[in-house]
Image: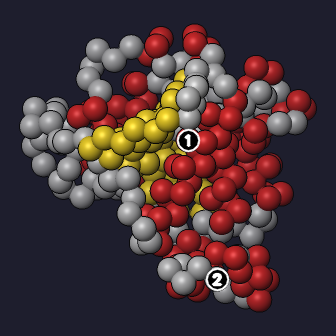
């Protein structure tokens, strides 16, 4: 690290369990963030600020006026109509011009997703539909890449981390084929803006823990937020022996 980097990241480096070695791990890391909406916004901004060296931003959607209430990475109304990954790039480049940022503006099919997951140290699922989540999970399981999954709707949120090292559960152990997307989308149910900020910030924290090796990541632990009462519940998720994705590994 150069002198400017030592100063920029000094408050993290001061933490004895991070230190210079931990910061160097962050600078050397590559993180794939899929979905640059309400969750992906705080994830990307905090990872960029923390000094993750290479962020890969994936989103095929465009910024809409209704996004600005919660998708804080696209706060400029002039971004309306711009691809979300490209809009996020503009914000992150201003936030930390020293990191590398790659944008992917088309939907990732299975083969292209596998190529990106293989290159990543950690994958963040910040999408809002089960088809995408199931595909991301399947590829991460087979590539043995850690996956940080989050979701938020109304005044509720959840986060869970999957190690994907040949044991433990995966996302399909939590949700089955008959999961209903209409019950989990902001466009159908609404969302209180800070709730995605809470969950997205926690996803970013888990990514930093995984990369640096500090703390205890939420491996196989489902953390549920009820923001109405600000109550938290934590449940251990067992592996499903009949899971179509991970049971045969």
Q: Which residue is drawn at 38% across and 49% down?
A: 161
Comparing 74 with 17, the one in front is: 17
Residue occupied by mark 1: 199
Secondary structure, mark 1, is: helix
Name the foreground residue: 197 vs 24: 197
Q: Residue furthest bottom?
A: 3
Rendered image quadrant of residue 242 = top left
How far from the left and from the top, in percent, is residue 119?
44, 59
Q: Residue at x 83, y 57 (%)?
A: 94
**Residue lying at 66% horizontally and 46% vertically, measured from the top left:** 42
**x then y, percent, for residue 28:** 54, 74
- Is residue 114 at least partly visible in the picture? no
- Estimate how packed mark 2 is, as few (under 14), some (14 to 19) or many (20 or more) residues with alpha carbons within 10 Å: few
Q: Which is nearer the N-term, disc 1 or disc 2?
A: 2
Q: Is residue 96 above or below residue 204?
A: below
Name the spot of residue 229 as percent of width and height, x first: 56, 29
Residue at 77%, 63% (x, y): give it.
96
**Count of marks, rendered view:** 2
Percent x, y for residue 167? 17, 53
Residue 18 shows in the view: yes
Q: In this view, does 158 lie to the left or right of 202?
A: left
Q: Give left or right: position of 167 versus 196.
A: left
Q: Is residue 107 above or below residue 53?
A: above
**SS for tag 2?**
loop
**Residue occupying the far right of the picture:** 78
Q: In which quarter of the image is residue 188?
A: top right
Q: Which mark is residue 14?
A: 2
Q: In this view, does 21 lie above or below 141?
A: below
Is residue 121 found left or right of 237 in the rendered image? right
- Structural distance between the alpha carbons of marks 1 and 2: 26 Å
Mark 1 closeness class: few <14, some 14–19, many ≥20 residues within 10 Å: many
């Amino acid at each position: 690290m150069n002198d400017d980097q030592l100063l920029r990241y000094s408050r993290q480096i001061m933490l004895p369990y991070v230190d210079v070695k931990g910061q160097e791990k962050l600078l050397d890391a590559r993180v794939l963030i899929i979905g640059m909406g309400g969750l992906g916004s705080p994830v990307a901004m905090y990872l960029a600020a923390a000094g993750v060296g290479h962020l890969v931003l994936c989103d095929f959607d465009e910024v809409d006026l209704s996004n600005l209430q919660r998708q804080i990475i696209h706060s400029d109304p002039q971004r309306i109509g711009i691809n979300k990954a490209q809009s996020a790039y503009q914000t992150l480049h201003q936030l930390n011009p020293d990191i590398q940022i790659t944008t992917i503006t088309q939907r990732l099919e299975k083969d292209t997703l596998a190529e990106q997951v293989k290159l990543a140290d950690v994958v963040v699922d910040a999408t809002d539909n089960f088809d995408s989540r199931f595909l991301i999970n399947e590829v991460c399981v087979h590539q043995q890449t850690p996956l940080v999954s989050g979701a938020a709707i109304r005044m509720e949120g959840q986060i869970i981390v999957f190690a994907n090292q040949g044991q433990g559960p995966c996302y399909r152990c939590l949700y089955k084929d008959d999961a209903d997307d209409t019950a989990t989308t902001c466009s159908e149910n609404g969302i209180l803006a800070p709730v995605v900020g809470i969950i997205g910030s926690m996803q970013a924290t888990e990514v930093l823990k995984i990369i640096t090796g500090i703390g205890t990541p939420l491996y196989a632990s489902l953390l549920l937020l009820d923001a109405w009462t600000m109550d938290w519940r934590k449940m251990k998720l067992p592996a499903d022996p009949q899971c179509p994705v991970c049971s045969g590994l």
